[in-house]
Image (cartoon, rainbow, N blue to C red):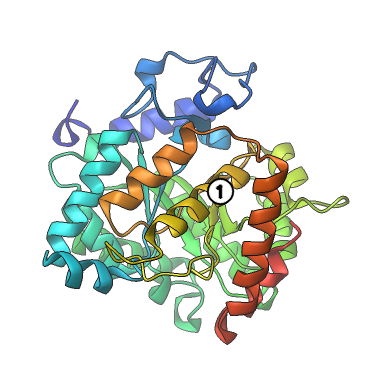
Amino acid sequence: MTDKQITRREFVRDSLAGAAGIAVGLSAVKGGAAAEKKHEVDTKKILNYNADMEYRRLGKTGLWVSAVAMGGHWKRFDKILSATGKTFEQNCHEIVSRCIDVGINYIDACTGAEVEAYSKALAGRRDKMYLGLSYCAREVRQEEFRSKRKLLESLDMLLKKSKQEYTDLWRITCMAPGGDHTFNTCCALVEALEKAKKDGKARFVGISSHDRRWLKFMIECFPQLEVVLFPYTARTKKVPKDSLFDALKKSDVGAFGIKPFANNSLFEGSSAPYDPHAEEDDRRARLAIRHILCNSLIIPIPGLVSPHQVDNVAKAVKERRELDLAEAKELAKVMDQAWAKLPENYQWLKNWEYV
């Protein structure tokens, strides 16, 4: 089935069927992760299935998403382009192509430029990947967009600019701290999400936040939320009591982990090809991804800026999941260094050591 053959009405139908509880799942997954026995699925029903990739159920959406997905942020793109001589569009197209090759089936984009770029790279193969989007500059972080009407206008504008009839996931980017939102704003954003889903402009809906307590409150108060995004690094651990993950499990909400590489503070090099730290940084990235994937409820979405980086995270999925003592000690040391290198405007990441 091509993207041209899929109508908005069909997506509304399929979304409602998923919410009703169609039996989907994977009886066994790659990389040593435990099977989810509750959910059985024919692998033919997994979008862009690749036997070398692991897939995880995205909560009550019923979607099965690659265990590592593609984040939209493209920090360090300039290093890649200057080293390879490729244009931005060429590099973006190659990254998406490589994601498809290795079985990655979700792209998350949260700025207007990101959505437009990845929509263009997906042209003609929209049926190979799920697309999640946000228009963070025109959503509730800005006071002007804290009403249902303005949020829906923003979504319409973004869909038109990116030449998309619908999005698989509309996830509104919220304020940090989220507690600064009034309850009226919370209600308005949920009403906008509901309307977009009803109209077939979004198959599924959710929010992104940097505020753990507020996010937990939103999940518990608004069952309409199907997916959430929040920071999850190689240093993140489940808090023993009143964990966000307890709320996720209870409400069957899917979760994407942003900033898995701690704003690139995990690395020593520049991410450019032939950087003297390239091999060591690849190893650090795989250690972090392996550690994060030990939490079966999380799908990390690193911003990948080259086909090589796509290959590296796909390799991590296939490697032994549990770190041995030496690897765990090494990762702890690396994360100490990453924490020490965090720039001032990313010190808030330290609030996500416990979730």
Local packing at callout 1 (Cα closer than 10 Å; few below 14, some 14-19, many 20+) is many
Left or right for 228, reference 107: right
Left or right for 194, reference 309: right
Quadrant of res 218: bottom right
Front-lying residue, 114 or 187: 114
Front-lying residue, 177 or 16: 177
Q: Image point 11% across, 67% down: which residue?
A: 85
Q: Position of residue 286 (x, y in %)?
A: 50, 47
Front-lying residue, 298 or 157: 298
* Residue position marked by numbered label 1 in the rendering: 287
Q: Image point 29% across, 47% down: which residue?
A: 166
Q: Is residue 182 visible?
A: yes
Whether residue 257 is situated above or below residue 1 in the rendered picture? below
Give the quadrant of the N terminus: top left
Give the quadrant of the C terminus: bottom right
Q: Is residue 163 visible?
A: no
Left or right for 96, reference 137: left
